[in-house]
Image (cartoon, rainbow, N blue to C red):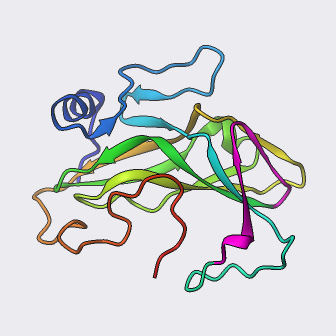
Amino acid sequence: MPIMPDTWIRQMAREKGMIEPFVEAQKREGVISYGLSSYGYDARVAEEFKIFTDVDSAIVDPKNFASNSFVTRTGDITIPPNSFALAHTVEYFRIPRDTLVVCLGKSTYARCGIIVNVTPLEPEWEGQVTIEISNTTPLPARIYANEGICQFLFFQGASPCEVSYADRAGKYMRQSGVTTPRL
């Protein structure tokens, strides 16, 4: 299962709409970088954030998710110490049937104790990616909207899968914005 290079990512973005909007080259000047890299794509975090809070003493339950467990904010945000936020990518992804995508956090944030978690993007999944952002530090942490947050790596299988995410009618198919847990 080889990792796919910039030439393949560019071709798939242009011809198949795999990433929209697509930024052809790394943007770095005065921002946390985003755009096409050698073997991946650095995505941007959009302006919508859901920051977890214990103001209402809500319990985070993936089977019964309570909307009062977070507050919604827009623009650049500060995640409280040892806290967590949900966000989504600016980019919309359409994953080919023979491809699996894995996401890693950007080193700029990782070096500040900010951990980014994204589950794999399965074959034929599409949508904006919901991003989990954890502040592991005892200090407040700033997250910059519309700048780089994570890098997606594209792995192409030896052949297309038998059953894709679309075939299974996955519950997060074509998600838009911050998507909270679904059962």
- Residue 141, compared with residue 123, is above or below; it is above
Quadrant for the N terminus in the image: bottom left
Nearest to the observer: residue 6 or residue 83: 83
Residue 4 lies in quadrant:
top left
Residue that protrudes farthest toward the right in the picture:
138
Magenta-highlighted residues: 66-82
Q: Is residue 157 left or right of residue 180?
A: left
Q: Is residue 39 left or right of residue 9?
A: right
> Which residue shows up at 32% across the image and 63% down it?
173
How many marks the image carries: the answer is 0
User: What x and y, as percent, mark residue 42?
Assistant: 47, 35
Would residue 19 be counted in the magenta stretch? no
> Which residue shows up at 33% across the image and 46% down it?
93
> Which residue shows up at 47% across the image and 37% down it?
43
- Residue 103, compared with residue 179, is above or below; it is above
User: What x and y, as percent, mark residue 38?
Assistant: 37, 28
Q: Is residue 137 left or right of residue 30?
A: right
User: What x and y, as percent, mark residue 152?
Assistant: 42, 44
Residue that protrudes farthest toward the bottom in the picture:
63
Nearest to the observer: residue 141 or residue 181: 181
Residue 110 lies in quadrant:
top right
Quadrant for the C terminus in the image: bottom left
Q: Is residue 112 left or right of residue 40?
A: right
> Which residue shows up at 35% across the image and 21% down it?
24
Residue that protrudes farthest toward the top in the picture:
29
